[in-house]
Amino acid sequence: MLLRVGIDDTDSKENMCTTYVGAVAIERLKAHNIVAQNHPKLIRLNPNWKLKTRGNCAVAFTVKVQNHQVPLVKETVLKTVEELAELHVETTNPGVVFCQGEKIPTKLKVFSKKVVQDIVTIEEAEALAREIGAEAHKFKLGRGIIGALAAIGNTLERDWTFELIAYRTPENRGTPRKVDAASVAEMDAKTYPNTFDNLDPSTGEIRITPHTPCPILYGIRGESPERVREANELVRALEPIEHTIIYKTNQGTDEHLKKVKIAEAKPYWSIIADGAVCLAPRIITGGHVIFRIRDETGEIDCAAYEPTRQFREVVKKLIVGDRVRAYGGIKEKLELPLTINLEKLAILKLAPALRKENPKCPSCGKRMKSEGKNKGYSCKRCKIKAPAGSAKVVRLKREIDLGKFEVPPRARRHLARPLIREVHVKFPTREF
Ligand code: ATP
């Protein structure tokens, strides 16, 4: 029989990572000759969820077992979570879900999508587990059953990527990570775009090593298990690696985004909204750039925050009337308009940039001055006048083009699909 296992909410800001807990559980089962089928899943959940520790991820895997092995699997997984989870930290509330059967119930798939795009409650998760006959184990508040169910229910049918994760040995955790930067640059040069987000092109900064005190040494993201494995051969770690795992993931797929009219947008959602710029970009304290768009239903602010760096340069050049498609998460806010934290921006139509030019003095060639509304123009020096209506409206060259623009890797959300994937990935089963 197929037994599906979901795990979530095991880490704290100071330690651990649910991907590691999953990887250890899988290793321990392997020692009993119980092998996870295909690739285990690393599922990123709603990136705007306020109770997430870091990247809001959960893991799931499936094992094929005989009836008599089921208790062993359950005991191994539960003991691993109990041993490794940061249970002493108040905000860590692990959940483990076991679900038997060949097919994933449609209701679970629907729930799974909701956890990526919206908010659900622990009660909703418990009711669903009961309904589909899944076994949900709660540690403390057990909030993790939400992510555990969502990870089992996400079948990664539309689009998917892979991540190879290398874990540090316990004695090195919490110390600076030692990975040869030149080898990462070489790996990127040889494997991009089959792997992506290895480096930030504008700063050269390595993106495969996290900056948190978790057990991960590095993670390589790519289009297939073969590609991330090849890339891993090129990376030179300068400290021991405990073990590696390859997860199939929804990272880099835009699964979190839903297309809405502006008035439908809600805090915590991630949306795609079309509109016309109705308030020109302005730079606020901290270097953030804000502008406003409007459709027939309402208005919403769009923000390109300082960490998005050069992306802001595109945003700054928008003018009132430009038609755009904004992609991004909506921050929690009580008053309207809400704000989209931009991940991507498509410029669909450019409005003409017009400037009124006063007539030139026929004698000295300098621009004449207005005498007041409808009073015409004059050159004070040459004492020459020109009638009202003799100013010309000229069209200025716009400094931006139509197209799609994205934030750099350093500011990218795990779920956001890098533009290179849209160009590069040609798998017929994947929709863009
Ligand atoms: P880790 O890297 O260990 O997975 P994390 O950043 O993913 O950490 P968690 O510690 O797992 O964050 O905390 C998120 C908690 O919120 C989990 O209990 C999860 O089940 C729950 N959760 C995630 N997404 C949602 C959602 N959309 N609605 C309600 N609860 C959610």
Image: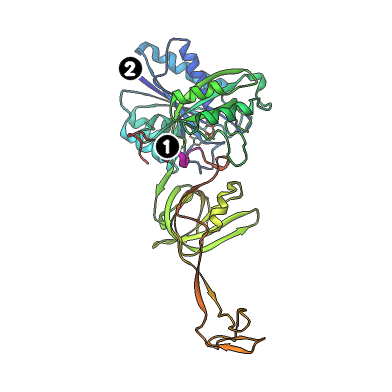
Q: Residue furthest right?
A: 175
Tell me where the magenta segment starts and ends, as one range.
414-424
Can you identify the residue that label 1 sits on? Answer: 424
Using a 10 Å C-alpha cutoff, classify the residue at mark 1 as few (fewer than 14 neighbours), some (14 to 19) or many (20 or more).
few
- Whether residue 213 is visible here, answered yes or no, is yes
Q: Is residue 317 above or below residue 270?
A: below
Quick one: 195 or 162, which is closer to the camera?
Answer: 195
Determine whether the residue tagged by mark 2 lies in a helix, strand or loop: loop
Question: Mark 1 or 2 closer to N-term?
Answer: 2
Q: Is residue 229 above or below residue 419?
A: above
Left or right of residue 365, residue 44 in this image: left
Snapshot colouring: rainbow
- Whether residue 115 is visible here, answered yes or no, is no
Can you identify the residue that label 2 sits on? Answer: 1
Q: Residue furthest front?
A: 363
Disc 1 marks a residue whose amino acid type is: His
The answer to whether marks 1 and 2 mark residues whose Cβ atoms lie closer than 8 Å is no
Using a 10 Å C-alpha cutoff, classify the residue at mark 2 as few (fewer than 14 neighbours), some (14 to 19) or many (20 or more).
few
- State the CA–CA distance, disc 1 to disc 2: 38 Å
Disc 2 marks a residue whose amino acid type is: Met
Identify the residue at horizontal 42%, vertical 37% (top origin). Answer: 424
Q: Residue 349's x, y, as percent? A: 42, 59
**Mark number, residue 240:** none
Determine whether the residue tagged by mark 1 lies in a helix, strand or loop: helix
Identify the residue at horizontal 50%, vertical 77% (top origin). Answer: 392
Whether residue 112 is in magenta: the answer is: no
Q: Residue 128's x, y, as percent? A: 37, 34
- Whether the residue carrying mark 2 lies under 8 Å from ligand 1 is answered with no
Quick one: 94 or 44, which is closer to the camera?
Answer: 44
Q: Residue 329's x, y, as percent? A: 49, 47
Q: Residue 233's x, y, as percent? A: 54, 20
Quick one: 417 or 19, which is closer to the camera?
Answer: 417
